Amino acid sequence: MAKTLAFGGLHLATSFSVAYIITGSVALSGAVTFVEPAVNTVVHYFFDKFWERRKTLRPRGAAPAQAPTSPA
């Protein structure tokens, strides 16, 4: 857990620094620093749902489904 918290702090510091270098605004950089992880969390949730659905629809290495053939 300590490593996760340390990385979270590093992520926030990096986000703030990059936003500040680009904008020069402490207020805007602070907003970006806290909005970006919130948006990223929501995106990650939906990405996980998509990823799991994709895995269940067609397992890796499986051949594409063939249309049923009628007897001649």
Image (spheres, helix red, strand yellow):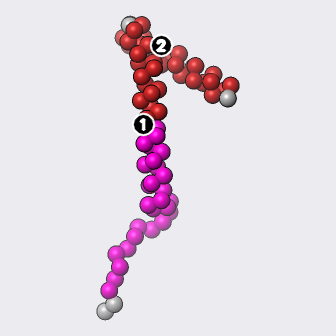
Q: Is any part of residue 61 visible from this angle? A: yes
Q: Position of residue 31 (x, y in %)?
A: 41, 16
* Of the image marks 2 and 1, the number of the one nearer the N terminus: 2
Q: Position of residue 4 (x, y in %)?
A: 63, 28
Q: How many C-alpha atoms fall within 10 Å of the one at disc 2: few (<14), some, or many (≥20)?
A: some
Instruction: Please name the amino acid that badge 1 sits on.
Output: Val
Is residue 66 inside the magenta stretch?
A: yes
| Label number found at residue 43 | 1
Q: Which quadrant of the figure contains the C terminus? A: bottom left
Foreground mark, 2 or 1, reads: 1
Instruction: Please name the amino acid that badge 2 sits on.
Output: Ser
Q: Which residue is mark 2?
A: 17
Residue at the image point whose x is 49% and y is 61% from the top = 59
Q: Do the residues bearing badges 2 and 1 touch, measured as CB atoms within 8 Å?
A: no
Q: CA distance from mark 2 to mark 1?
A: 23 Å
Is residue 19 inside the magenta stretch?
A: no
What range is drawn magenta here? Answer: 44-70
Q: Which quadrant of the figure contains the N terminus? A: top right
| Label number found at residue 54 | none
* SS at mark 2 in the image: helix
The reply, left or right, for residue 7 in relation to residue 2 is: left
* SS at mark 1 in the image: helix
Residue at the image point whose x is 45% and y is 20% from the top = 34
Camera-nearest residue between 11 and 37: 37
Q: Is residue 8 above or below residue 69?
A: above
Q: Quadrant of residue 40?
A: top left
